[in-house]
Image: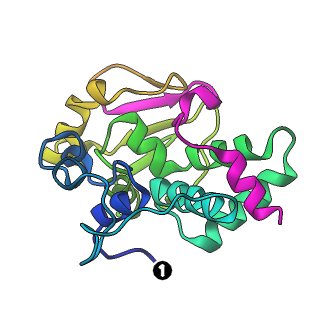
Amino acid sequence: MARYRAAVCRLCRREGGKLFLKGDKCFKSNCTIEKRGTQPPGMHGATARRKVLAGYGQQLREKQKVKRIYFVLEKQFRNYFEKASRQKGITGENLLFLLERRLDNVVYRAGFSTSRRQARQLVNHGHIEVNGRKVDIPSFQVKVGDAVTVKDNTAKNVHVEGAWQTAVGRGRPNWISSTGGEALSVSVSALPTRQDVDANINEQLIVELYSK
């Protein structure tokens, strides 16, 4: 399976802001953006000037940013766009909703992990159940009423426990609610809305890029 294996902090610097790809590190003073600012990556990053983008360049950077936030590759991202364009409603928002409803994103949003990469690993390794059944496909689309739970033996993992304890500080969207009790479990109580997605994303630029 194709996946990005290189350093991820350089992706944040390339996009000129935090994409929250490194979990707790992104909230600490040793975050690369905090130490180096938004200078571009590479050996000439300190002296390189950021070009003022317009038109195609601006659209491309927005698409790359969203791809990197949700950690999907180009072919899969394009498939999401085509599916969004066939649905009723606003194509750009439909695209974001499809990305938000990915199981790995729900695991991250619920607070079972500190990053989407960590969430994807939990799903791939079979540590997550949906409605009591193991689901190991990160792109699985959750729906209203689904219960997403960490397996009992995995819930005692120090990384999962740490993520759950700090989840309140990171915030949980309104469409995901805790089921209470001792088990690490949440339910999908509604579909995501535009207010639940990063306000810094301009999805219309992505629509314009793919509509050319």
Q: Is residue 90 left or right of residue 34?
A: right
Q: Is residue 185 visible?
A: yes
Choose between 184 and 67: the one closer to the eye: 67
- Color theme of the render: rainbow
Q: Is residue 120 magenta?
A: no
Q: Which residue appears at 38% of the width and 64% of the height?
A: 49
Q: Is residue 140 left or right of residue 3?
A: right
Q: Which residue appears at 55% of the width and 35% of the height?
A: 197
Image height check: is 204 above or below 56?
A: above
Q: Amino acid at mark 1?
A: Ala
Q: Position of residue 18 (x, y in %)?
A: 35, 48
Q: Position of residue 42 (x, y in %)?
A: 28, 75
Q: Is residue 187 magenta?
A: yes
Q: Which residue appears at 20% of the width and 29% of the height?
A: 165
Choose between 8 and 35: the one closer to the eye: 35
Choose between 45 and 32: the one closer to the eye: 45
Q: Is residue 133 visible?
A: no
Residue 109 picture quarter: top left
Span highlighted in magenta in the image: 183-212
Image height check: is 175 above or below 35?
A: above
Q: Which residue appears at 40% of the width and 57% of the height?
A: 123
Q: Position of residue 126 (x, y in %)?
A: 38, 59
What residue is pinned by disc 1?
2
